[in-house]
Image (cartoon, rainbow, N blue to C red):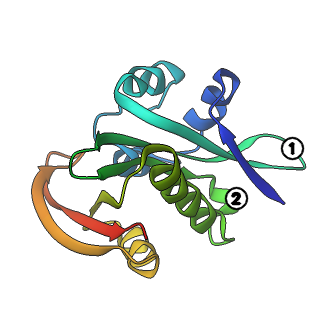
Amino acid sequence: MIFHRNLLKEDLEIISLLPLNIEELFFISPRFEYPLTPDQIIKILENRFSPTVITDTNTQLAIAYANLYDLNHEDSICWLGNVIVSPDYRGKGVSEYLINIMMDKARNEHGIKKMKLFCHNINTRALIFYCNQGFTPCGYKIIMNQDNKKIVSIEMERELI
């Protein structure tokens, strides 16, 4: 069984170990540097909201994490960020649960009606996942990846009804 709760300081070390490599860390945030450290997570949280972890009820350890940023109450939009799921829990419904919790928090705690995110074109698994969760492409930007090569970061959005 799994459940969600707010991020605790003791979760930071575990979350920093979730990305398997530099590419996965780039998918979580282009602003992070490999290897991820608790200090990097704390730094990025300065401009983030509702940092949330999913935990395994057997171990009580964090197995997934995400947060919200750029809350715009005037336009009723926010962005989903820093999504990561433990490799041991991928493909087991944890991602769906996490995204649903984050959408509920955006809607119920912040009064948001639309959620947006960026997903890199080379992250096919995540693109398919977000499409299956009702997100649709609505824009893009060209960015440089961790190898200093151009990639497309696809903007996606979903109404929170």
Q: Classify residue 144 as left or right of residue 81.
A: left
Q: Which mark's residue is nearer the viewer, 2 or 1?
A: 1
Residue 31's quadrant in the figure? top left
Q: Classify residue 32 as left or right of residue 65.
A: left
Of marks 2 and 1, which one's residue comes earlier in the chain?
A: 1
Q: x, y (%) of residue 115?
A: 35, 59
Determine whether the residue tagged by mark 1 lies in a helix, strand or loop: loop
Which residue is pictured at 63% across the width and 57% down the height? 87
Q: Which dot marks residue 88?
A: 2
User: Would you say the residues marked 2 and 1 are in contact, meaning their CB atoms lie under 8 Å apart?
Assistant: no
In front of the other: 55 or 38 = 55
Q: x, y (%) of residue 50?
A: 51, 38
Against 86, residue 122 (above or below) is: below
Residue type at mark 1: give it: Thr
In front of the other: 62 or 32 = 62
Residue density around tag 1, few if under 14, some if 14–19, many if 20 or more, within 10 Å: few
Q: Quadrant of the C terminus?
A: bottom left
User: Cα distance, mark 2 to mark 1?
Assistant: 13 Å
Residue 25's quadrant in the figure? top left
In front of the other: 127 or 33 = 127
Residue density around tag 2, few if under 14, some if 14–19, many if 20 or more, within 10 Å: few
Which residue is pictured at 38% across the width and 22% down the height? 46
Question: Would you name the residue on which mark 1 appears?
Answer: 59
Q: Classify residue 84 as left or right of residue 88.
A: left
Q: Classify residue 77 as left or right of residue 94.
A: left
Which residue is pictured at 69% across the width and 61% down the height? 89
